Amino acid sequence: MSLLNSIIPALSRKPAATADSASTVTVPTRKPVFEINETAEAYGVTVHLPGVDKDGLELTLEDGLVRVLGRRSWRSPAGWTALHRETADVAYELVLAHDNAINADAVAAELRDGVLRLSLPKTEALKPRKIAVN
């Protein structure tokens, strides 16, 4: 690991939990489309979860991981047969690793029209500050 990587915190994509882990999802999952932006104050994560509502969303922040699990709420009506379907009927799972640079008490999340927006504020120690020189 380079010195730059050890100083600058980063969010990175981690593989899903292993089969022996307690947080393993028992259904097949798909990685959603997501985007990460960084400002001096926080990380911003936008995750596209079409068909997921608030009841089907699980967001956890623990052990250096941000985990988003989204289950779709729509079910096909009885007697209905699809002729063509562009999306698979599976849950979404996204696991992002961080180096404990996130203030867990100030995390904010908003889900609107299948788009989840997360604000992950940085801890005070990582925010840039001006140092006075005597």
Image (spheres, rainbow, N blue to C red):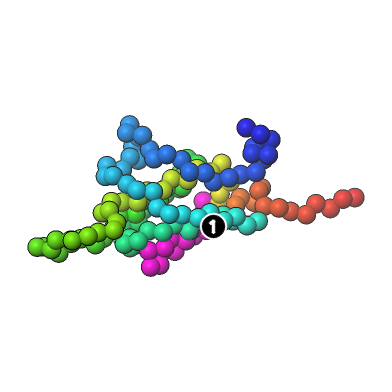
Q: Residue at left 66%, top 47%?
A: 125
Residue lying farthest to the right in this orientation: 134
Along the line of sight, the residue nearer the viewer: 29 or 110: 29
Above/below status of 30 relative to 112: above
**x and y percentages locating residue 38 in the rendered image:** 60, 55
The answer to whether residue 123 is left or right of residue 51 is right
Q: In this view of the protein, can residue 32 be seen by the observer?
A: yes
Q: In this view of the protein, can residue 59 be seen by the observer?
A: no
**x and y percentages locating residue 78 in the rendered image:** 11, 62
**x and y percentages locating residue 60 in the rendered image:** 42, 49
Q: Residue at left 41%, top 59%?
A: 48
The answer to whether residue 97 is left or right of residue 92 is right
Residue bearing the label numbered 1: 44
The answer to which image quadrant residue 54 occupies is bottom left
Q: Which residues are magenta?
A: 104-120
The answer to whether residue 73 is left or right of residue 13 is left
Secondary structure mostly seen in magenta is: strand
**x and y percentages locating residue 111 in the rendered image:** 41, 64
